[in-house]
Amino acid sequence: MTVFEVGEEYFEQQFTNQTLTQEVVTAVTFEECFFTGCNFSETQFQRCIFRDCTFLNCDLSLLDVDYSTFQRSKFAQCKVIGVNWAKVMRVERIEFHDCNLSYATFMELDLSRAVLSRCLAKEATFAETNLSEANCTHTDFTGSRFIHTNLTRADFRGANNYAIAADQNTLKQAKFSLPEAIALLEGLDIVLEEPS
């Protein structure tokens, strides 16, 4: 187990198979660090900075990111379940590939150009979120909430199980695939019939 002391700075460090659960980490800076197979579930990272970091095959479920910053950080094949990302101080160019983002909250965040590709985002919240130019391809959005979300030029090709009300969200030049895109017509008070 690695104990991160208050105010420490790590540059180009590799952390492999580290377990740090239900702990509190405060004001630590990680720059260009690589985390592989780590378990940080239910740990509080308060006022920490993650810059150009990569997380691979980590368990970050119920992570507390209170007032932390994530800049150009990438997550691949990670469990990031139930994280309230709305508590971050700043998020910039974040990427999730093949991750479980279920029950996460991204409310009121600027996730423009973010990547949420091939993820499971079950019952995640994207209310008042800026997802303009985001890559959301091949992600399962079962039960997720999109309310007043900016999806301008977002890419949802191959995504499925989304319920995005066309009259409550900005969809200008967003990309969707058929037949899943038929779901965009729900809530428009129109009648759809199969051709006879």
Image (cartoon, rainbow, N blue to C red):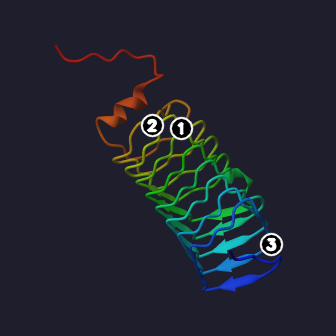
The percent position of residue 61, horizontal first and vertical second, equals 62, 54
Residue designated by label 2: 162
**Disc 2 residue type (three-letter):** Tyr
Label 3 crowd bin: few (<14), some (14–19), many (20+), radius 10 Å: some
In the displayed structure, 130 sits above or below 148; it is below
Is 46 positioned to the left or the right of 102 in the image?
right
Quadrant, the C terminus: top left
Q: CA distance from mark 1 to mark 2?
A: 7 Å
Instruction: Look at the numbered discs 1 and 2 and tell me whether their residues touch, using CB distance below 8 Å.
Output: yes
Is 150 positioned to the left or the right of 192 in the image?
right
Numbered tag placed on residue 166 in the rendering: none
The percent position of residue 84, horizontal first and vertical second, equals 68, 50
**Disc 3 residue type (three-letter):** Ala
Q: Residue at x 80, y 78 (%)?
A: 5
Residue designated by label 3: 27
Q: How many marks?
A: 3
Q: Residue furthest left?
A: 196
Query: Which label's residue is closer to the chain start, 1 or 3?
Result: 3
Residue designated by label 1: 144
Nearest-to-viewer mark from 1 and 3: 3
